């Protein structure tokens, strides 16, 4: 009879405990929004989202073959024709005209426009010789030098790009774009401190230069200068309300640096309205949604992340957590199992899978295997060791339970429930002095912990300590009359009066 009572009360105690603690599975593991991780389990594991900083140029077209020059038409006439077509944004025909012009005579502006059009098509190898020729013919034209720098930059010939941009500035010191491009290159090379001054200069020279402020935000963020990054990004989006990359950068500062999660979520929400191709951002939104109890949003964002990046175990883990909170345990199991298949050493996913079985489905035997895997990967997780110890007790594997619960209380000495459950294991192994010590420790940590008083009462009954059992009974009558009745029923008649 006593064994039945003990098992039932152990069950009740564990259920009330885990209802409050199981959500620790939403760990900062890896993924930002990452991660989110400092934030996120794809979050630290992570997927920190790196803001895409490529300059957006004009729409591109496909080039048609150039027809031969007509007899009697001069290079200047072809160049003028090209200018009209270029102004009308008819770049294919403009390229034909400019190409015919330079076939007849070297004209700097024609070479410049040829290079510009090839840059626009992202055909930088073709753009480069045309722009080199333009700057040889007219070395004092800052715009030509800037366009040459753009070709070099996109070919990742950064030293040459820097030289071209600095030459442009030497020609025209108030030209904002080359300052911006120099800052961009420094950021791209991880030289964030060097990026600050040219970007500030660019922003001061050109009104409403949102891209310069976006790059400033990026540099400040990478230098952990959070408040300056926030100010720069906020300035960028005030100037350009559809600047998705800047909103995402702002979200990154709040998410990774300042841990202001509501602000991060709002910034990311704004960002994905205009830029929705970044899987890490959707992962970060999922992590934040789970953290802030927006579980439907978290599930939707996790699915978006997976759609953009199929093999994304951290996103599957966040989807599993969201499904748990949305009362869809079977979907949660599928998500966690997918995360494990994609990343076999992913402790958070094993923990989440164990929690589905332990907390949500009360299928304690099924929770053992994933919890055991989780402990192998993350041995310092006291909560998982407690849950696993509880499961071992439920299976009458009391020695195994002692091993897990002893480690739980070593890792977290103030863990009242683990001391209590360890006391139960030791009692079942008839190690009564050790059981008494653990239960008294639990009571010292939390004097009104009724389950510890109940178990200690059972120990006293086993020890035939009538005075001790009656003292625990009196305490339980005040704390929990139902448990007091259970202790009374378990006691032999000689202890009841």
Image (spheres, grey):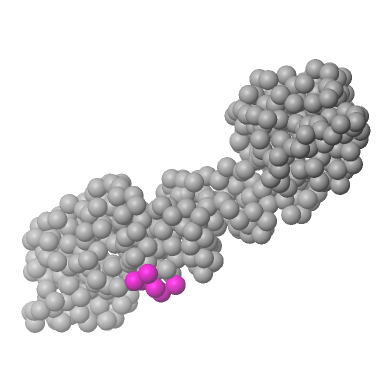
Q: Is residue 478 visible?
A: yes
- Give the quadrant of residue 2: bottom left
> What x and y, as percent, mark residue 159?
66, 20
The residue that appears at 24% across and 71% down in the rendered structure is: 363
Q: Give the position of the N terminus as an image quadrant.
A: bottom left
Q: Would residue 47 appear left or right of 218 to someone viewing this image?
A: left
Q: Is residue 444 visible?
A: no
The residue that appears at 81% across and 49% down in the rendered structure is: 239
The residue that appears at 62% across and 32% down in the rendered structure is: 188
> What x and y, as percent, mark residue 380?
30, 46
Q: Give the position of the C terminus as an image quadrant.
A: bottom left
The residue that appears at 41% across and 74% down in the rendered structure is: 327
Q: Would residue 291 appear left or right of 212 to someone viewing this image?
A: left
Q: Would residue 377 appear left or right of 49 to someone viewing this image?
A: left
Vertical position of residue 310 compared to residue 123: above or below: below
Decide which of 13, 492 is in the foreground and name it: 13
Residues in magenta, as a range: 326-331
- Give the quadrant of residue 150: top right
């Amino acid at each position: 009879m006593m064994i039945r009572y003990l098992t039932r009360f152990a069950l009740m105690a564990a259920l009330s405990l885990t209802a409050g603690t199981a959500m620790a599975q939403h760990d900062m593991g890896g993924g930002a929004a990452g991660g989110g991780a400092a934030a996120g389990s794809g979050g630290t594991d992570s997927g920190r989202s790196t803001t895409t900083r490529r300059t957006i140029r004009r729409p591109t077209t496909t080039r048609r073959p150039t027809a031969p020059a007509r007899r009697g038409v001069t290079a200047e006439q072809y160049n003028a024709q090209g200018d009209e077509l270029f102004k009308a944004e008819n770049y294919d025909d403009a390229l034909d005209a400019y190409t015919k012009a330079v076939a007849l005579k070297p004209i700097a502006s024609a070479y410049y426009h040829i290079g510009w059009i090839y840059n626009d098509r992202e055909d930088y190898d073709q753009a480069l010789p045309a722009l080199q020729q333009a700057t040889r013919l007219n070395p004092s034209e800052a715009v030509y030098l800037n366009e040459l720098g753009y070709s070099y930059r996109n070919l990742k010939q950064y030293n040459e790009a820097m030289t071209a941009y600095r030459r442009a500035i030497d020609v025209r010191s108030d030209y904002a774009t080359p300052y911006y491009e120099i800052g961009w290159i420094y950021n791209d090379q991880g030289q964030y401190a060097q990026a600050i001054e040219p970007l500030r200069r660019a922003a001061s020279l050109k009104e409403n230069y949102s891209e310069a402020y976006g790059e400033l935000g990026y540099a400040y963020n990478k230098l952990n200068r959070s408040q300056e990054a926030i100010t720069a990004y906020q300035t960028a989006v005030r100037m350009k309300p559809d600047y998705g990359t800047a909103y995402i950068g702002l979200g990154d500062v709040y998410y990774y640096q300042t841990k202001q999660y509501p602000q991060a979520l709002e910034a990311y929400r704004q960002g994905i309205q205009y830029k929705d191709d970044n899987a890490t951002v959707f992962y970060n939104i999922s992590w934040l949604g789970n953290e802030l109890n927006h579980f439907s949003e978290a599930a939707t964002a996790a699915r978006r992340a997976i759609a953009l990046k199929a093999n994304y175990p951290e996103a599957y883990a966040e989807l599993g957590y969201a499904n748990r909170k949305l009362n869809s345990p079977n979907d949660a199991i599928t998500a966690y199992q997918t995360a494990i298949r994609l990343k076999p050493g992913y402790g958070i996913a094993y923990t989440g899978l164990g929690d589905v079985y332990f907390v949500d489905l009360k299928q304690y035997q099924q929770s053992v295997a994933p919890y055991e895997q989780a402990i192998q990967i993350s041995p310092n997780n006291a909560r998982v060791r407690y849950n696993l110890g509880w499961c071992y007790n439920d299976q009458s594997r009391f020695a195994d339970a002692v091993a897990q619960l002893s480690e739980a209380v070593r890792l977290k000495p103030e863990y009242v429930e683990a001391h209590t459950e360890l006391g139960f294991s030791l009692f079942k192994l008839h190690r009564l002095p050790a059981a008494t010590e653990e239960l008294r420790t639990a009571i010292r940590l939390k004097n009104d912990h009724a389950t510890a008083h109940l178990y200690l009462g059972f120990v006293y009954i086993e020890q035939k300590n009538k005075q001790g059992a009656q003292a625990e009974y009196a305490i339980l009558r005040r704390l929990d009359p139902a448990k007091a009745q259970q202790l009374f029923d378990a006691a032999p008649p000689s202890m009841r009066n």
